[in-house]
Amino acid sequence: MSFGAARPGEAGGDPLEVLRVFLRLGLTSFGGPVAHLGYFRNAFVVERGWLDERAYADIVALCQFLPGPASSQAGFAIGLGRAGLLGGLAAWAGFTLPSAIALTCFAFGETALTGRAGQGLLHGLEVAAVAVVAQAVLGMARNLAPDRPRAAIAVLALLLMAFAPGGASQIAAILAGAGAGLVVCRQAGDAGREAEAPPLARTTGLLALAAFFGLLLLSFLPARDSGLAFLASVYRSGAMVFGGGHVVLPLLRTAVVDPGWVSNGAFLAGYGAAQAVPGPLFAFAAYLGAAATAPPGGAPGAALALVAIFAPGVLILIGALPFWHALSRRPQARAAMAGVNAAVVGLLASALYDPVWTSAVRTSADFAVAAAGFAALAVWGAPPLAVVALTAAAGVGLGLV
């Protein structure tokens, strides 16, 4: 079977069918991008047979290679193969909108959380982010930096961020990781496998790549309107994420907290709330768009920020699909990506300390709650929703003491 079960225009599925299946997944898929890929395999390979194991592995390999939210990109590719471009959009909408709507509602309700109990709840969500990000660092280090060369790349990226924090250093760390990967990750680069040919024309791919890079270039230009500047920063963050949804944390913080559009406390509270909802972590952008002081704010701001953060991942996926068959055969490309993935482990480790740890852990009680949440996630395999709920409850309790 080829890349995706049905090519656009062929019988085998329709956008409404895709929307129904992905909406169910969007309401029930907890656990982050790795867990989402497991849910997708069970739903589309095992249960429905929309594509076979090899085609699914090809999709996952490509989405891990590209910047952007891997699980959302994989879902878009599955919908694309099932029912064309409308199927891809239906897959994205069904998987993303439930969590985006929930986080937008949280942004509206957050301002009502006053008093000791309300502030304790928000602080509990900040502490929950410590446990979740720490687990993400551990899991990503095991998978993406399992040997000495890649561990060294991760440590060097961490050192760069420690001594020169900022958005430019994040980009420099990713580029340096790619260069180092070409030199020291050749063994990882030799482990790949050729992908199936995808169902998109090269002309479509080139147009999508032109849109991706054109918008990325525009996002670096200064904008007088604060609303456009906010959306440009969100788009730029979505275009620079390698290695999973949690890596967007330091990029988004630099993009929206440093200019003063969202306070650091509100940012971490929203990030903690994002762990309690199903679906992709990138839906966190809807919360930021609703909570930002930059216009338009509210529901329109949430919708625009959501499109801004997902657009680069979708565009580069559409752009890469027609060329992935040839590129995946090159050991150099896989080696460079292994280095990039190792570097993002260092980026996320840096974010674990600042801003997550420094903002949330203020007392020994905060440390104890964060450590208990981390142990529940990493040792006992507790569901993230349960850990976030219990940590938030602990924050309320500590706030009332």
Image: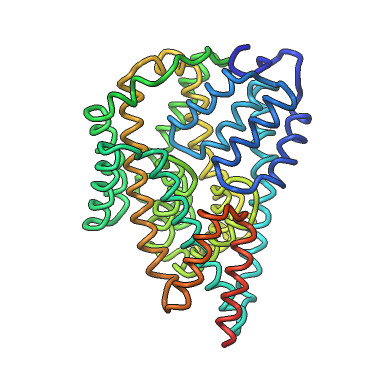
| Colouring chosen for the image of the structure | rainbow
Q: Quadrant of residue 96?
A: top right
Relative height, residue 7 to residue 108 (above, below): above
Q: Residue at x 55, y 33 (%)?
A: 73
Outermost residue toward the front in this view: 380
Relative height, residue 36 to residue 210 (above, below): below
Q: How many numbered callouts?
A: 0
The spot of residue 285 in percent (x, y) is: 54, 52
For residue 366, side relative to residue 277 (left or right): left
The spot of residue 374 in percent (x, y) is: 49, 60
The spot of residue 347 in percent (x, y) is: 34, 49
For residue 96, side relative to residue 375 (left or right): right
Q: Residue at x 45, y 70 (%)?
A: 360
Q: Residue at x 23, y 33 (%)?
A: 180
In the depicted view, which residue is nearer to us: 128 or 306? 128
In the rendered image, the quadrant that contains the N terminus is top right
Q: Residue at x 46, y 56 (%)?
A: 133
In the rendered image, the quadrant that contains the C terminus is bottom right
The spot of residue 158 in percent (x, y) is: 28, 51
Relative height, residue 151 to residue 371 (above, below): above
In the depicted view, which residue is nearer to us: 144 or 275? 144
Relative height, residue 197 to residue 287 (above, below): above
Outermost residue toward the bottom in this view: 401
